[in-house]
Image (tube, rainbow, N blue to C red):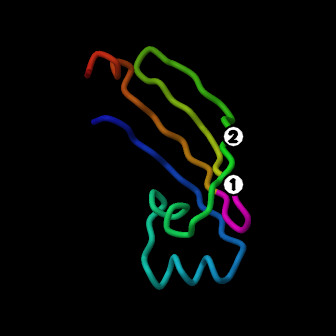
Amino acid sequence: MFCTATSVVKITREEILAEVIDNKVGIGQLFRYLHILPEFELLEADKTSDTLWRLYRLTADGVTCTIKEVFPGNLFALF
């Protein structure tokens, strides 16, 4: 396992919501597909004995994604 991610996506523009529903666009493709450059905001990051993690937000007009990524603590040993 490389990473586990949990995401909350809030869409406030009907035309973006329709595109996501009709074209089944995933979070990873959402901004690229819609030609939107989001702003990145790092909310938190930390390291425990077993993991590295970060919580961040990607924001653009009509779309907000809040994402928590959890990586194994030995992440850099994998390379």
Instruction: Name the residue at 51% across, 76% down.
Output: 20
Helix, strand or loop status at disc 1: strand
Q: Give x and y (percent) for residue 51.
A: 43, 23
Between 21 and 19, the one lying in front of the other is 19
**Amino acid at dot 1:** Thr
Find out whether residue 71 is within the magenta segment.
no
Instruction: Name the residue at 62% across, 62% down.
Output: 36
The magenta segment: 59-64
Q: Give x and y (percent) for residue 38.
A: 65, 53
**Amino acid at dot 2:** Glu
Q: Give x and y (percent) for residue 31.
A: 55, 61
Instruction: Name the residue at 66% across, 70% down.
Output: 11
Q: Which mark is residue 59?
A: 1
- Above or below, comparing residue 38 to residue 36 in the picture: above
Q: For the C terminus, which image quadrant?
A: top left
Find out whether residue 63 is within the magenta segment.
yes
Earlier sequence position, callout 1 versus callout 2: 2
- Above or below, comparing residue 15 to residue 44 in the picture: below
Q: For the N terminus, which image quadrant?
A: top left
Assess whether mark 2 and mark 1 are in contact (beta carbons under 8 angstroms): yes
Instruction: Please give the residue where the numbered disc 2 appears in the rendered image.
Output: 41
